[in-house]
Amino acid sequence: MGMSVKPCIYCSAESVYYRHYSGEYLCSRCFTRSVQRKVARTISKYSMIKHGDRVAVAVSGGKDSLSLLHILSKSARRHGNELVAVTIDEGITGYRDESLKIAREFASMLDVEHAILSYRELFGSTLEEALKARDEKAISMSACSICGTFRRKAIDSIAKAVGADVIATAHNLDDMLQTFIINISAGDVERIAWMYPEPVEYANGLRKVKPLLEVYEHEVAFYALINDIPFQSEQCPYMNEGIRSSIREFLNALEQKHPGIKYNMLRTILKVSKVLRDNLEFKRYRCSVCSRECSTASGICSSCMLTMMLANGSSSISISSNGSNNNNNNSKIN
């Protein structure tokens, strides 16, 4: 005799998901609604998106970014918002082509405008070419650090080009915890301060938000699965060069033994980041090369510094916001 399936606690339909940290059994419909409501509360709580905003949703073709686009598309018209999906093409052979196709077709299915910007268009070379230059010049930087530095500028550039007011990225709860640990290990206090989710308008007039920050990564994946969202399952071939994968494994093992501990950690991180944001003095500069806002006293933004390093072979130029190379790819769009 087979085991009976627990009913959904909200509608008594057959459950398909057990939420370990809350003890809830949920059917697919109620699970979907719970995630959408959670994202809506996050947006409201931190004043992420205003009525009438044009929102550039950073979309790569992965589960997180396509789920975010799907969730925002459900409420955009109701709140007077326009969405535009923006995709960055790093130029990774055999990997990015598939995801570009998925992103383009999914945006079309949702009737959302879609724009693409490549590293070659913006920087004159692909990520693979940049990594080749790194190896030839013996520059000690991971692929994630190089890609993340270029990606941040690329997302800003394409969002500005499409006339966006807000950039929405698909960082989930797990990403937030991983980023905090990376920043702690690098001593990057300023980046920890900027993790607080209430958006700040930058000199270029854009705000950056993370609507999925209170949603577990595996719940985003399940949302994509039960809502038939097509996504690229193949991982980036360079993902294991950084330390993020090791941190992910550690946090997942911790959550398995202590359900809900990730939520507790997130709440603490947000408290810490708010205290830092409220008490630190942030000096902003204008890059003398590209005119982009930056935080380095040298007056050269991180992406321009990196371009110079790859061209000249100098590894003595630091590229993070506080001058450290912390291998933090915090511009995820997957």
Image (spheres, helix red, strand yellow):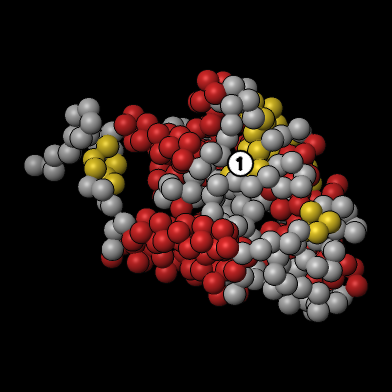
Residue 116 in view (yes/no): no
> Nearest the camera: 159 or 14?
159
Would you name the residue on which mark 1 appears?
A: 168
Q: Amino acid at mark 1?
A: Ala
Is residue 322 rendered to the left or right of residue 106? right
Give the quadrant of residue 158: top right
Quarter of the picture holding the N terminus: top left
> Nearest the camera: 60 or 196?
196
Name above or below for residue 53 compared with residue 276: above
Residue 140 picture location, percent across and down: 73, 77
Tell me what residue is drawn at x 64 percent, y 53 percent: 331
In this view, the residue farthest toward the left is 1
Residue 116 picture location, percent across and down: 75, 39
Tell me what residue is drawn at x 23 percent, y 40 percent: 25
Residue 207 picture location, percent across and down: 66, 43
Is residue 44 rendered to the left or right of residue 11? right
Give the quadrant of residue 57: top right
Tell me what residue is drawn at x 51 percent, y 61 percent: 275
Give the quadrant of residue 145: bottom right
Residue 271 in view (yes/no): yes
Name above or below for residue 313 compared with residue 193: below
> Nearest the camera: 327 or 241?
327
Number of numbered discs: 1
